[in-house]
Image: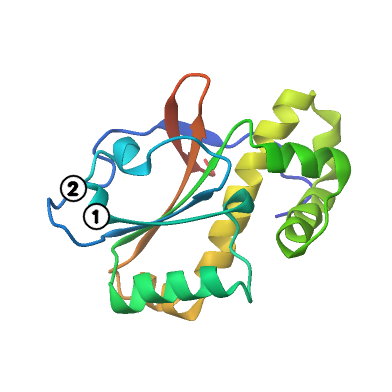
Amino acid sequence: MSETRLRRLATEPLESNYIPSLQHNTPQVLWIGCSDSNFKEFTMLNILDDELLVLRNIGNMIIDGDLSCDTTIKHAVVDLQVKHIVICGHYGCRIVKATARDGLKGPWLSKLNALYSAHQGLNQLPVSERDRAFVELNILDQLHSLRERPEVANGIALGRLHIHGIVYDSEVEKAYRLSEG
């Protein structure tokens, strides 16, 4: 993602049947979300809670070498053969706001800092717009990292795995799927 890409992403309201429920008690979706979000994933997708495997961490990050993340993704894709992986960020994320202000440290936060540094033009936006745009850029960056994993790339190539970027707006209690259109 280059510095020239400072425009806001197109968002579309998330339909309640975006990922149709199979009405089975087996996971079909791996949800990667942020640890400081406050919503119920299965309610947002309108699927059974048993159809969802959830991984939450700081900033909904895909970090190489994070044993929990690595193991969860591999288990979901290879063993459970989930059909969808969702990376969901949320506007108002305190981790994203802190990164934009303070330059936090650690492997998760270093990745956010690098992403923020690559998009210094964000500083030209009003703070609330900057934070919203950065949440969206982070989701896209995590989708890119996810696509680079061999098991995910293989599942996508075989047509049995789909990945999605979603952003949640708690002010209006709605979720939106991201598209780069």
Q: CA distance from mark 2 to mark 1?
A: 8 Å
Is residue 30 toward the left or the right of residue 146 in the image?
A: left
Considering only vertical position in the picture, is 109 above or below 45? below
Is residue 153 toward the left or the right of residue 15 in the image?
A: right
Q: Position of residue 119 (x, y in %)?
A: 80, 47
Residue 148 visible in the displayed image: no
Q: Residue at x 74, y 65 (%)?
A: 107
Crowd class of label 2 (few under 14; some 14 to 19; many from 20; radius 10 Å): some
Mark carried by residue 28: none
Q: Residue at x 38, y 38 (%)?
A: 40
Q: Quadrant of the N terminus?
A: bottom right
Q: Residue at x 59, y 32 (%)?
A: 91
Considering only vertical position in the picture, is 129 above or below 75? above
Is residue 164 toward the left or the right of residue 113 in the image?
A: left
Residue 3 visible in the displayed image: yes
Tell me whether the residue at label 2 lies in contact with that at label 1, contact meaning CB atoms closer than 8 angstroms. Answer: yes
Q: Which residue is mark 2?
A: 21
Considering only vertical position in the picture, is 13 above or below 45? above
Q: Which residue is mark 1?
A: 51
Secondary structure category for the residue under label 2: loop
Query: Which mark's residue is nearer the viewer, 2 or 1?
Result: 1
